Amino acid sequence: MEAEPILATRNLTIAFGGFRAVDGVSLIIKQGTIHALIGPNGAGKTTCFNLLTKFLAPTSGSIIYKGRDITSLRAADIARLGIVRSFQISAVFPHLTVLENVRIALQRQRGASFDFWRSERALKAFDKPAMVLLEDVGLEDFAGLPAGQLPYGRKRALEVATTLALDPDMLLLDEPLAGMGHEDIQRMAALIRHVAANRTILMVEHNLSVVAALSDRISVLARGRLLAEGDYASISQDPQVIEAYLGTGHG
Ligand SMILES: Nc1ncnc2c1ncn2[C@@H]1O[C@H](COP(=O)(O)OP(=O)(O)OP(=O)(O)O)[C@@H](O)[C@H]1O
């Protein structure tokens, strides 16, 4: 059965002065897929991502989520609808333990009041679901460690756990593998695949071999425009895509 679109854009455009960083981009992201947004440096990926996550407002065009026009909604509104961005906003509190970080994220999600979350008993009620989330991201052995002491790759796994605490239908990942060594890359790639089991993932990512391994569908941007879309086998054969990458001495 063909998956339904969960998120779509129609002619999404943003101009800075006269320069169109994202220019008439129409994307369709299907429910339950891992979708990657790639392209050479300066292609407009981050800007497009910022439009989808409401960090920027488009000059024209629209964004549709589950059939509803969300173009004019704010970041907090879309989070409530189930679209959550990881990695740039997910603060990790370094002096709190790994478990406490996830517990706080869960408390926020459930809208617990300040008085409520001062009570030790109420806090403990979140320990179990927090542990389940830690197990989900492979951090159960680190639960008691101050988050600031986690190695970099594990810290990013913790960010995934705090993001999952918001119970998103759609997870937007901004360069999830950036700055990671080989082992962390493999672990994060497996984690993305794992959390994608019952969610939709959109990621901007430069690591093309992981994009190839993980993505159901890939959209290629170049100079603000959508150049090609398809699975890795088809886009990697596309002469325009090859030229766009070679033209910048990239990838
Ligand atoms: N606020 C802004 N004002 C003016 N120009 C901008 C602004 N934000 C982005 N741009 C320009 O838009 C273009 C696209 O930038 P963007 O960061 O989205 O590209 P990218 O594909 O994410 O690149 P990279 O892979 O290098 O991160 C670039 O030419 C950039 O200089």
Image (cartoon, helix red, strand yellow):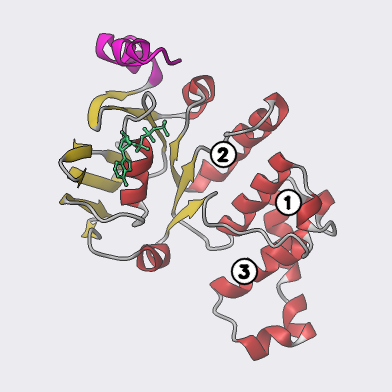
Q: Residue, x 29% and y 44% (percent of image)? A: 4
Residue placed furthest toward the front: 17
Q: Nearer the viewer, mark 1 or mark 3?
A: 3
Image height of 37 relative to 202, above or below = above
Rounded to the nearest angstrom, the CA distance separating label 1 from label 3 is 15 Å
Amino acid type indicated by mark 3: Leu
Whether tag 2 and tag 1 are in contact, CB under 8 A, the answer is no
> Measured from the top left, where is residue 102 in percent x and y?
68, 63
Q: Is residue 228 left or right of residue 180?
A: left
Q: Is residue 28 left or right of residue 179?
A: left
Amino acid type indicated by mark 1: Glu
Which residues lie in the magenta part?
A: 232-251
Rounded to the nearest angstrom, the CA distance separating label 2 from label 1 is 14 Å
Image height of 175 relative to 130, above or below = above
Element carrying mark 1: helix
Q: Which residue is mark 2?
A: 192
The image quadrant where one finds ligand 1 is top left
Magenta portion: prevailing SS class? helix
Whether tag 3 and tag 2 are in contact, CB under 8 A, the answer is no
> Measured from the top left, where is residue 55 in percent x and y?
36, 56
> Measured from the top left, where is residue 160 in percent x and y?
60, 50
Image height of 239 relative to 220, above or below = above
Q: Nearer the viewer, residue 27 or 174?
A: 174
Q: Residue, x 81% and y 51% (percent of image)? A: 149
As drawn, the label of residue 106 is 3
Element carrying mark 3: helix
Whether tag 1 and tag 3 are in contact, CB under 8 A, the answer is no
Q: Which residue is mark 1?
A: 135
Q: Residues within 10 Å of mark 3 (few under 14, many from 20)?
A: many
